[in-house]
Image: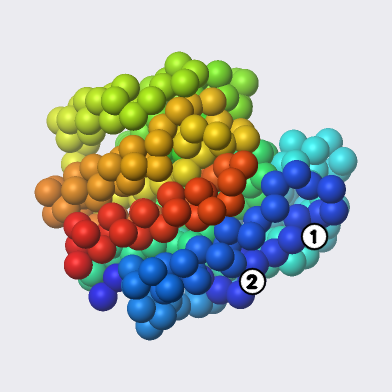
Amino acid sequence: MIKVAFSPVYRYQLPEGHRFPMQKYELLPEQIVRSGILDASAFFAPDLLPIDDLLLTHDEVYWQKLASLTLSRKEEREIGFPIREDLIVRGRHIAQGTLDCALHAQHGGVALNIAGGTHHAYRDRGAGFCVLNDIAIASNVLLEKRLAKRILIIDLDVHQGNGTAAIFQDNENVFTFSMHGASNYPLRKESSDLDIGLNDNASDQEYLKTLDDALIEINHAFTPDLIFYLAGADILLGDKLGRLAVSVDGCFRRDLRVMQFAQQMDVPIAVTMGGGYHHRLATLIDAHANTYRAAVEVFQ
């Protein structure tokens, strides 16, 4: 059975005045069940990530600042909002959810986290609305405990996975691939193992052809035993923070391609939702729900 990580703590409110309401974390599970994509029994609530697991990725000084709520104003500005205890707790549950999804995928082929994809967080600092890097945390735990040997991270958020790239820049057991808008945040890009920057207004045909070519290249360059897939919906035309022009159908076909890539290689895949800031919430929910449709179509 396909498993989905979701907890009530995923539902949270950003500080007053923040311009990106996060209702999608509440609405998406409802849409998945109401549309008959998956049954409610597919959902599980992840526990709180242990600190020892967190510290396999994040610097202890940074963690102590988070835990004591003593980040400087400059550090909070780089993240994008003031740090609160509930946001840290939320991040630990999400990171555990991504780890749990990887373990479930090793048995069922695929598992998905309603949240996650916090790829801008570095080892020693947060950035871009990201406090803890859930995919990096899960990857390092799996490698440390010898539950995986070679991990491929496919990051298709519209923004480069700069924090993830920096964390794994010297790790030969992790291959980082980021395909993103060339002119999108962050201004200063890091070096992934494979980076592809797309021009503004790239549409379905260009996007999918570029992805197809990249997956062929990766298949020749790296043989993973686990894939993490960051399925950002901010590639959509009309996204407030994106500059691409991919349709909802194009986004669905992207997800199908990645799922089929994993299935054809017989490699388990753990999926996180990543970004999505469309001006029309219903469109965003449809695009995210399609990721689950793709998982069901390929694996169930």
- Residue 275, quarter of picture: top right
State the mark number for residue 5.
none
User: What residue did someone put label 2 on?
Assistant: 9
Q: Nearer the viewer, mark 2 or mark 1?
A: 2
Tell me: residue 101, above or below residue 129: below
At horizontal 33% and vertical 68% (from top left) the residue drawn is 37
- In the image, taking residue 37 as reference, residue 84 lies left or right, namely right
Say which amino acid is labelled 2. Answer: Val
Query: Residue 128: where, in percent of width, then height?
Result: 66, 39
Q: Residues within 10 Å of mark 1 (few under 14, many from 20)?
A: some
User: What residue did someone put label 1 on?
Assistant: 84
Query: Residue 58: where, in percent of width, then height?
Result: 60, 50
- In the image, taking residue 253 as reference, residue 84 lies left or right, namely right
Say which amino acid is labelled 1. Answer: Arg
- Residue 83, quarter of picture: bottom right
Q: Quadrant of the N terminus?
A: bottom left
Instruction: Please say whether residue 144 is visible from this viewpoint.
Output: no
Query: Residue 40: where, in percent of width, then height?
Result: 41, 80
* Structural distance between the alpha carbons of marks 2 and 1: 13 Å
